[in-house]
């Protein structure tokens, strides 16, 4: 009995691939072709682009602590003009400080509100918006420099 069932299953399996009286055409997998010209521009954004060089430094912290650290460092740089921190943190905060100075140069209400949302001190934002157009008016970016100093004593971390 088992041998008969085995032979019937083999014959049924082979008959599925035969062209006589079968509906199987050999194209069981449907292939979808994408129209890249039509799908690449959706809403003005190119969806086929890759995220090269978009990574940010994690600074060994979760996202909320990293944001708080960068906000605090930005506030202190604007307040004191220079700070002493690790090289990686200095390079990470440079982007935010340059953005705050650019907002200060713009000087409109929306830029002021964006700066108030990032910088902790309200009076510091007002001082930045008064001084930035005069001090950085003719410069088109690159407002901050990272100057390397000697390594930290305890753990030999690179400082700037």
Image: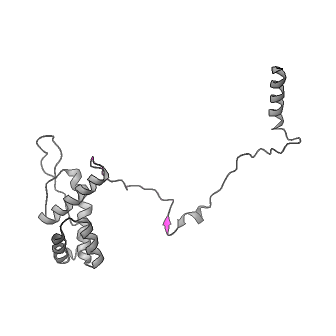
In this rendering, position of residue 1 left or right of residue 45: right
In this rendering, position of residue 133 left or right of residue 6: left
Q: Camera-side residue: 89 or 66?
A: 66
Q: Is residue 26 magenta?
A: no
Q: What stretch is highlighted in magenta?
A: 44-61
Q: Does the magenta stretch include residue 52?
A: yes
Q: Where is residue 13 in the image (x, y as percent from the top left)?
A: 80, 33
Number of marks in the rendered image? 0
Residue 141 visible at all: no
Name the residue at the front extreme. 1
Q: Position of residue 98 (x, y in %)?
A: 24, 66
Q: Where is residue 126 in the image (x, y as percent from the top left)?
A: 18, 74
The residue at the point 24 percent across, 70 percent down is 116
Where, quadrant-wise, is the N terminus in this rendering?
A: top right
Q: Position of residue 158 (x, y in %)?
A: 18, 47
Q: In this view, does 144 lie above or below 15?
A: below
What secondary structure predominates along the stretch shown in magenta? loop
* Colouring: one colour
Q: Is residue 73 above or below residue 150?
A: below
Snapshot quadrant of residue 110? bottom left
Q: Camera-side residue: 55 or 109?
A: 109
The residue at the point 29 percent across, 54 percent down is 64
The residue at the point 22 percent across, 53 percent down is 89
Q: Is residue 142 above or below residue 6?
A: below
Snapshot quadrant of residue 113? bottom left
């Amino acid at each position: 009995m088992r041998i008969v069932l085995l032979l019937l299953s083999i014959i049924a399996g082979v008959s599925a691939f035969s062209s006589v009286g079968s509906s199987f055409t050999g194209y069981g997998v449907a292939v979808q072709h994408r129209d890249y010209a039509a799908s690449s521009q959706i809403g003005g954004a190119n969806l086929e682009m890759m995220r090269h060089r978009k990574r940010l430094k994690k600074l060994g912290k979760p996202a909320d602590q990293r944001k708080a650290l960068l906000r605090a460092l930005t506030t202190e740089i604007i307040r004191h003009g220079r700070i002493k921190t690790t090289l990686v943190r200095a390079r990470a905060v440079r982007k935010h400080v340059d953005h705050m100075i650019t907002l200060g140069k713009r000087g409109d209400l929306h830029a002021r509100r964006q700066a108030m949302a990032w910088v902790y001190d309200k009076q510091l934002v007002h001082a930045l918006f008064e001084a930035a157009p005069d001090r950085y008016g003719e410069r088109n970016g690159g407002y901050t420099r990272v100057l390397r100093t000697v390594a930290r004593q305890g753990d030999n971390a690179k400082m700037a």
